[in-house]
């Protein structure tokens, strides 16, 4: 079996590649330019297709001759919906049998572009005639990776929304496993699945888990959006503006929802937990 992977060089989607390789799937990585080829091969891709989601013509050739496509939309791209729809249409035109879309939980939240932009992609897929599996993950635990050094240096875990707002999380390795199961078997065919680990926590509770894992106090910080983007070196543009709206929404409503029942049933085991994830981050630090 051969799968075209969008995001093979990405922070999260790259985790799907080893899951596919483990199941003897040949991975063709879709990369935007030649300079990313080595990274994709190191990740485990055996074939490379140079194509760009912004260039629909390039996608047709990339999807020719594969059995399945794994697709993720680049975060906060201004024309995010168009990019995903273009990939669905190219896969259909190339005769692809199976399409797995890594979407987001609650695409019905119209106020948030990063949620609403997934709806047209899902709709295109439902009308495509291809066998589909739509994954609707909640917040990724892997988001912590980028702020972990700051947590250790400053003893503070900061995000620009209320520290009392609760959110649900999922380890993207579990999402990757579900994606690989969907691409290599029939059990998840024609399904749309909300994916999350059990429970919802706020940042005070997360900081307490971090404190326990590293053996010293971590506070929950709540900087303004501008302070936070400056510290995180997030430049002006669609990503920053999308984040501003998203964090304002989290501030008011949190990021609720998702029921671990679904992930538990699909994997036949407990989903990876937040405590385990934080413990792994902490042990990597101690051993490095
Ligand atoms: N973070 C969360 O907690 C969370 C939760 C739920 C859902 N989501 C959703 O998950 C997605 C994650 O996005 P991400 O960008 O952060 O993931 P990512 O895993 O980094 O993957 C994005 C991939 O898309 C590639 N890409 C970007 N623009 C492209 C283009 N024009 N043509 C071809 N490939 C292109 C990137 O390639 P390069 O390597 O060349 O950059 C990268 O490999 C978003 O849709 C987000 O809304 C995120």
Image (cartoon, rainbow, N blue to C red):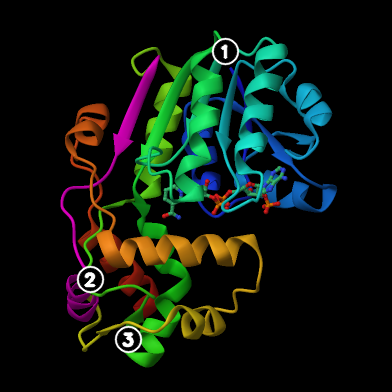
Q: Which residues are magenta?
A: 189-212
- Say which of 236 and 68 sits in front: 236
Q: Which mark is residue 206?
A: 2
- Name the mark nearer the viewer: 1 or 2: 1
Quickly name the residue at label 3: 156
Q: Is residue 6 left or right of residue 114?
A: right
Q: Position of residue 71 (x, y in %)?
A: 57, 34
* Magenta stretch: includes residue 204: yes
Mark 1 CB within 8 Å of ligand 1: no
Above or below — where is 124 with respect to 211?
Answer: above
Say how many tags the image has. 3
Q: Earlier in the sequence, mark 1 or mark 2?
A: 1
Please tell me whether mark 2 sits on a helix, a strand or a loop: helix
Please tell me whether mark 3 sits on a helix, a strand or a loop: strand
Quickly name the residue at label 1: 128
Q: Is residue 156 left or right of residue 117?
A: left
């Amino acid at each position: 079996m051969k799968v075209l992977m969008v995001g093979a060089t990405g922070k999260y989607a790259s985790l799907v590649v080893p899951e596919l390789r483990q199941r003897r799937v040949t991975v063709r990585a879709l990369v935007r330019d030649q300079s990313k080829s080595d990274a994709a091969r190191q990740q485990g891709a055996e074939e490379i297709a140079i194509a760009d989601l912004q260039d629909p013509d390039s996608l047709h050739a990339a999807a020719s001759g594969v059995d399945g496509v794994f697709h993720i939309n680049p975060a906060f791209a201004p024309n995010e919906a168009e990019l995903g729809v273009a990939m669905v249409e190219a896969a259909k035109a190339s005769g692809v049998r199976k399409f797995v879309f890594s979407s987001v939980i609650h695409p019905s939240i119209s106020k948030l572009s990063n949620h609403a932009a997934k709806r047209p992609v899902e709709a295109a897929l439902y009308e495509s005639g291809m066998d589909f599996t739509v994954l609707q993950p909640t917040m990724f635990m892997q988001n912590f990776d980028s702020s972990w050094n700051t947590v250790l240096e400053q003893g503070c875990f900061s995000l620009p929304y209320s520290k009392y707002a609760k959110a649900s999380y999922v380890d993207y390795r579990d999402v990757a496993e579900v994606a690989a199961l969907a691409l290599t078997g029939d059990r998840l065919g024609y399904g749309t699945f909300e994916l999350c680990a059990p429970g919802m926590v706020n940042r005070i509770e997360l900081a307490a888990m971090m404190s326990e894992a590293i053996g010293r106090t971590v506070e929950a910080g709540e900087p303004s959006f501008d302070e936070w983007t400056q510290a995180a070196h997030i430049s002006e543009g669609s990503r920053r503006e999308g984040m501003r709206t998203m964090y304002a929404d989290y501030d008011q409503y949190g990021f609720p929802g998702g029921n671990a029942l679904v992930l538990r049933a699909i994997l036949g085991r407990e989903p990876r937990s937040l405590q385990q994830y934080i413990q792994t981050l902490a042990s990597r630090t101690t051993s490095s």
